[in-house]
């Protein structure tokens, strides 16, 4: 069986797989039925479900409005120092480090307790039990954003260098990344030959984690224009496996309900959004790897896939998503041709006995 993604593909990479929401252009994606994957190797080829079957049903969930982050919002090819204490090719349970933004502390006490003591601990515990990572991270140190969003890369140097200055603050979505999680600022001034590290050295980073999730409760523009509880995405990808190492989840403060009957729905929404941040997003399909760690989409010399400007995202290969034409029955015994997009990675396309 293959998971069917049915987009009204006008011109954009859509709100991410499984979502009717909008991304950096006009397309919409939605689930056709529910997803059943046996030992699913999803989330960039570095995570897999540890259970035999991993069911996800969205039939009773509210509409998903996941936005694929724009290219300027994501830092890829982040260099991580090798952790010599961890074997590289064994499967370990995913470790998520949750970092709460100061906006969480500013919530009313009952909402703050709900978020920090119930919603996110339960969602994170579920995902850590369910998913495994093949190549665990060492210490995670994130790359700094550039003041102008322009940067250079030097041959035989894994770091990126901002042209001019690093940004005063590095953001993961709407949340500001703590200084102690950041690499040293590296800049090029006056051309690619005048480059070097400036300012404070590498900070302590995040130890014993494979993914850092920054959680905020900021009343953003999205919260004011969309009827949503929360939204999430990835913001930085590491260099070797292209996997997300950092992402955010923002709760719209006015939509947080402390009513007991609302808890199950909110928990389901939070799990769903974190999964987007971990890698199940149309913006990351081109970065998926196979079980041996090889990219499923070809790369250029800079290590990146081709960028589709009309879609606003990196273009995946047909080893990840395939376009097919199908006949659909409609009213009055008529049949129409309909374009569907199938996720066809080996662990998703499985036979069910």
Image (tube, grey):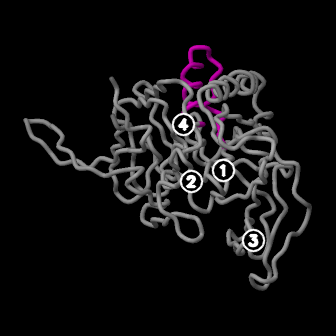
At mark 4, the secondary structure is: loop
At mark 3, the secondary structure is: strand
**Are the residues at dot 3 and dot 2 in contact (C-beta closer than 8 Å)?**
no
Is residue 325 shown above or below 92?
below
Q: Between marks 1 and 3, how big is the CA–CA gap? A: 19 Å
Quarter of the rendering containing residue 111:
top right
If the image is split into quadrants, where does the C terminus sit? Answer: top left
**Residue tagged 1:** 173
Pick the residue in front: 34 or 253: 34
Dominant secondary structure of the magenta stretch?
helix
Question: Which portion, as a residue range, is magenta?
Answer: 248-274
User: Would you say residue 101 sits in the magenta stretch?
Assistant: no
> Local crowd at mark 4 within 10 Å, few (<14), some, or many (≥20)?
some
> In the rendered structure, which disc, 4 or 3, sits on the residue that comes first in sequence?
3
Q: Between marks 3 and 2, how big is the CA–CA gap? A: 20 Å
> In the rendered structure, which disc, 1 or 4, sits on the residue that comes first in sequence?
1
At mark 1, the secondary structure is: loop
Residue at the top extreme of this rendering = 260
Picture coordinates of residue 43 (x, y %)? 55, 42
**Residue tagged 2:** 69
Q: Please name the residue shown 42% across and 65% down the image.
A: 310
> Local crowd at mark 2 within 10 Å, few (<14), some, or many (≥20)?
many
């Amino acid at each position: 069986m293959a998971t069917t993604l049915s987009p009204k593909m006008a011109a954009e990479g859509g709100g991410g797989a499984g979502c009717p929401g909008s991304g950096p252009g006009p397309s919409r994606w939605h689930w056709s039925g529910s997803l059943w994957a046996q030992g699913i190797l999803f989330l960039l080829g570095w995570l897999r479900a540890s259970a035999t079957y991993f069911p996800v049903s969205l039939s009773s969930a509210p509409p998903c409005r996941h936005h694929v982050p724009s290219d300027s919002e994501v830092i890829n090819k982040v260099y991580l120092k090798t952790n010599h204490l961890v074997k590289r090719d064994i499967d370990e349970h995913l470790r998520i480090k949750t970092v709460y933004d100061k906006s969480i502390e500013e919530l009313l006490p009952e909402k703050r307790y709900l978020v920090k003591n119930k919603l996110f601990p339960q969602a994170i515990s579920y995902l850590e039990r369910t998913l495994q990572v093949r190549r665990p991270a060492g210490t995670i140190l994130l790359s700094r954003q550039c003041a102008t969003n322009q940067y250079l890369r030097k041959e035989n140097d894994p770091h990126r260098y901002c042209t001019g200055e690093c940004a005063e603050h590095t953001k993961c979505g709407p949340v500001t990344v703590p200084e102690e999680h950041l690499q040293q600022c590296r800049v090029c001034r006056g051309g690619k030959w005048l480059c070097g590290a400036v300012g404070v050295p590498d900070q302590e980073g995040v130890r014993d984690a494979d993914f850092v999730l920054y959680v905020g409760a900021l009343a953003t523009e999205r919260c004011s224009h969309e009827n949503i509880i929360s939204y999430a995405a990835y913001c930085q990808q590491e260099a070797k496996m292209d996997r997300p190492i950092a992402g955010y989840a923002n709760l719209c403060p006015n939509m947080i309900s402390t009513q007991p009957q609302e808890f199950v729905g909110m928990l389901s929404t939070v799990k769903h959004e974190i999964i987007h941040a971990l890698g199940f997003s149309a913006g990351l399909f081109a970065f998926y790897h196979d079980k041996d760690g090889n990219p499923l989409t070809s790369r250029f010399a800079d290590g990146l896939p081709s960028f589709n400007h009309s879609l606003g995202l990196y273009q995946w290969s047909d080893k990840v998503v395939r376009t097919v034409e199908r006949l659909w029955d409609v009213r009055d015994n008529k049949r129409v041709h309909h374009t569907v997009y199938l996720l066809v990675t080996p662990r998703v396309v499985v036979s069910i006995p």
